[in-house]
Image: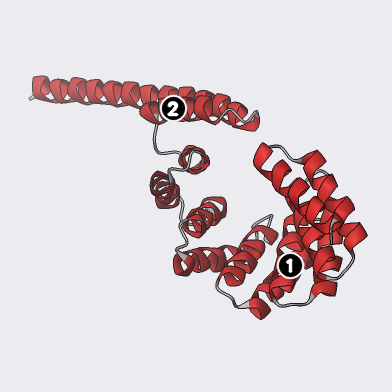
Amino acid sequence: MKKSVKGCLLLMMALLFLTSCASGQKQLKKQQSEAIRNLGEAYMGQGSTTLALREFLKAERLYADDKYLQDDLGVAFMAKGSLEKAVTHFKKALDIDPEYSPARNNLGTAYMEMENWEDAIECFNIVREDLIYATPHYPLTNLGFVYYKLGKYDQSIQYYQEATDHAPDFPMAFHGMGLTYMAMGKNAEAVTALETAVAKAPKEAPIYMDLGKAYQRSGEFNKAYETFNKAAALAKDNKMKTEALDAAKKVWSH
């Protein structure tokens, strides 16, 4: 009987040892994965999406149950244009933590890129109800864009305005507001919104491009000419540069 008890104790100790070893190995892999994820995030910060994605996938092979990593993978795949894969990883992040609002906002953004407006709206509405989410102007601005694309301009303006109430220095919301006002034929309001956007983001060529169009629609051709040339000077690609210079020429010959 004593031998049986002693044998059981030894077996229990062996099992505890093996469990401890397995737990230790899992923790080690988790730490290694986090270190690799941090490297991937550094690459993302430098704009090196391919290198970042390579590190994120390497980290996932070590430890996949990490909401931050799954969100990072989604962002990287979205930057590469692989929207279906992005959606998969954002959903994995939410499976790990259903209340992780950054991943839900990113999921909504992926749906928005796919023109899946209904699912995008659902995501953004959930995020904007999260009282502890630090950047509510993001989902609000996204909702403004969705309703702009749907042609529901009054709702679009409402969300953009709410976004600027939360973040008065957020140029994307003023840019979107300006585009919506132009679509509504409210050129004076469009000019005001886009001038504000330019003041808050003075190096963004696309905003100057749209401000030039608003000036042109308002009959302010000199301002339009100067603004299109500014857009051309700031353009980061030849396509936008050419478009801006062509617009300036057309205004000049008006």
- Label tally: 2
Q: Residue at x 86, y 55 (%)?
A: 252
Residue 19 position by quadrant: top left
State the colouring used for the structure image. Answer: secondary structure
Residue 8 in percent (x, y) is at 15, 25
Check if mark 2's residue and mark 1's residue have beta carbons within 8 Å.
no
205 lies above or below 19: below
Nearer to me, 130 or 221: 221
Q: Residue furthest front?
A: 253
166 lies above or below 181: above
Circle 2 residue: 59
The numbered mark, 2 or 1, whose residue comes first in the sequence reads: 2
Mark sitting on residue 177: 1
Q: Which amino acid is tagged 2? A: Ala
Q: State the separation of the CA atoms marked 2 and 1.
A: 40 Å
Residue 177 position by quadrant: bottom right
Can residue 168 be spotted in the picture? no
